[in-house]
Image (spheres, grey):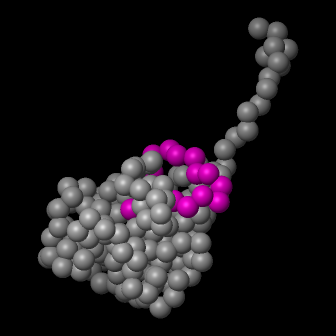
Amino acid sequence: MTTITITTSANTESIAGYSVAAMEKVGQSFLGNGEELTSVSFYYYKAGTPTSDIKISLQADSSGSPSGTDLATGTLDRTLVSGTTVGGANQVTVTMSAYTLTNATTYWLVWARSDASTNTTNWIAVVRNASTNDYASGTSKHYNSGAWTTSSALNDLRGHITTTALVSNINLGANDFGGF
């Protein structure tokens, strides 16, 4: 099992589904490592009482932004987000559908409300680092009105991606099975 750490420090947020903040979707790029994507674990907090789960999707890179085509998906259950401030954000791990990442290829994780709506009072935020871009091989962006925009300070989202090494093919001859 391998962990791709994006950043471990945070002091601001990126909001998925909060149109007033110009963030219908939030994205974080990273480099693949040749292993199978297993899960993603990031920090979240909420405002109000969110009524929609968050869909997390893995997408290929298209000219420096997410492609819009899901390669793998997972769902952040809104009831698992308990924090109500950045300082009280809690880490939630989401299992992703299987996808083998190509080594040294840029991918994006994209967060969006599962019902594709926006709401200015009931939302879930993905916490990000407001002061530095800790993960040199990626950046964060937000999506609004049909376009991806680089987040103001190139801040990374707080969390990590877990991958699992693939087992190599093992060629077993007939005698290896006792001659059956």
State the predominant SS element of the stretch in magenta: strand
User: At 48% from the left edge and 78% from the top edge, which residue is drawn?
Assistant: 156
Disc tally is: 0
Q: Which residues are magenta?
A: 96-110
Question: Where 66 sits versus 91, above or below?
Answer: above
Which of the two residues, 95 or 82, is positioned nearer the viewer here?
95
Q: Position of residue 38 (x, y in %)?
A: 53, 52
Q: Position of residue 56 (x, y in %)?
A: 37, 58
Q: Position of residue 35 (x, y in %)?
A: 63, 51
Q: In the rendered image, which quarter is residue 104 located in? A: bottom right
Q: Is residue 109 magenta?
A: yes
User: At 49% from the left edge and 74% from the top edge, which residue is drawn?
Assistant: 139
Q: Quadrant of the N terminus?
A: bottom right
Farthest right residue? 175
Question: Where 47 sits versus 178, above or below?
Answer: below
Is residue 73 found left or right of 136 in the rendered image? left
Is residue 6 found left or right of 45 in the rendered image? right
Farthest bottom residue? 131
User: At 30% from the left edge and 62% from the top edge, which residue is drawn?
Assistant: 112
Q: Position of residue 95 (x, y in %)?
A: 45, 53
Farthest front residue? 63
Q: In the rendered image, which quarter is residue 148 located in? A: bottom left
Q: Quadrant of the C terminus?
A: top right
Which of the two residues, 72 or 172, is positioned nearer the viewer here?
72
User: At 39% from the left edge and 85% from the top edge, which residue is drawn?
Assistant: 152
Which of the two residues, 24 or 175, is positioned nearer the viewer here?
24
Question: Where 133 sits versus 72, above or below?
Answer: below
Q: Is residue 162 visible?
A: yes
Q: Is residue 113 magenta?
A: no
Q: Is residue 94 visible?
A: no
